[in-house]
Image (spheres, rainbow, N blue to C red):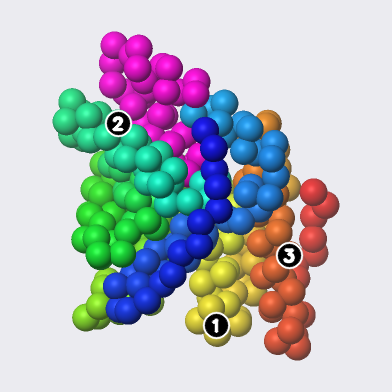
Amino acid sequence: MMFTKQARGIRSKTGLTLLFTVLWLQATAGAAPLANPVFFQRATADYQATQTRWQTATNVSPAGWQFARACYTLADFATNDENRADLAVQGIEACRKLIKAEPRSGPGHYWLGMNLGQLARTELLGALSLVREMESEFKTAWNLDPAVDYAGAARSLGLLYREAPGWPTSIGSNHQAREWLERATRFSPDFPENWLVLTESYVAWDETPKARESLQQLAKIWLAARTNFTGVLWESNWADWNARRAAAEAKLAQSGAPTKAPRQTD
């Protein structure tokens, strides 16, 4: 599968929807994995392996949502809309087939929402309708199985509300973003991504005391997380998390007051 660069322009109110969708996906996936060819190779291998299992599966779950997850991950490495959309559509189709067979599949609804987000990155005219479908799928996933991807539905809803333009253009709401992001940390407090996203959001909202508190909570779970989330499948996450934690600490340090809890070594 070849990935080539393609310039894209963003314009008009519809372009704002595309822009926030790109921001949402950058927040959910991070930029660090894209710079490492090893991570790309692993994502490609996972895509190929899960595709084979999906094509030969006698049961749609878990093969369907595992393939959809691999499609979403590999789409982060795409550098043009055609390849990203192709992967997203494959993930979407797998999830729709899974949901048709198992309507109450939390992972099916969750990874459908995530792949819709990838597809929205490639859309101008259709992005807004995709955004509302993403919102619906994440809410359904949360109601069915909030544990999927360590409160991933709550985290994704928070990011969606944080990055989307507000009414009447789209669904953006800092109030709802706060509710969902804080809910993610309460439900899955040992997962670093939840605290990182909440910290970054407080920084964006100029809520420095809350950002410091959130960062301190992250420091408390950091060493245990290093033990719990191990292996090659987590290496790209840790590359991303380390960079984002350092960036959050640097931003808060610029405010002039102490920001760090005693840092545990990695």
Give the number of the disc on residue 207: 1
Task: Left or right? Give the position of 246 relative to 11.
Answer: right
Q: Earlier in the sequence, mark 2 or mark 3?
A: 2
Name the kind of residue labelled 2 in the image: Ala
Task: Left or right? Give the position of 214 relative to 171.
Answer: right
Label 2 sits on residue = 94
Looking at the rendering, which quadrant does residue 259 occupy? bottom right
Q: Is residue 114 visible?
A: no
Name the kind of residue labelled 1 in the image: Glu
Please tell me whether mark 2 or mark 3 is closer to you in this view. Answer: 2
Task: Name the residue furthest right.
Answer: 265
Residue 139 placement (x, y as % from top left): 26, 53
Q: Residue at x 60, y 81 (%)?
A: 209
Residue 64 placement (x, y as % from top left): 34, 27
Q: Secondary structure at mark 2?
A: helix
74 and 69: which is toward the camera: 74
Label 3 sits on residue = 246
Q: Are marks 2 and 3 in contact (CB under 8 Å)?
A: no
Q: Residue at x 44, y 43 (%)?
A: 83
Q: Which residues are magenta?
A: 48-76
Task: Left or right? Give the position of 261 relative to 187.
Answer: right
Q: Is residue 138 above or below residue 200?
A: above
Question: How far apart, in angstroms, are the residues tagged by discs 1 and 3?
Answer: 18 Å
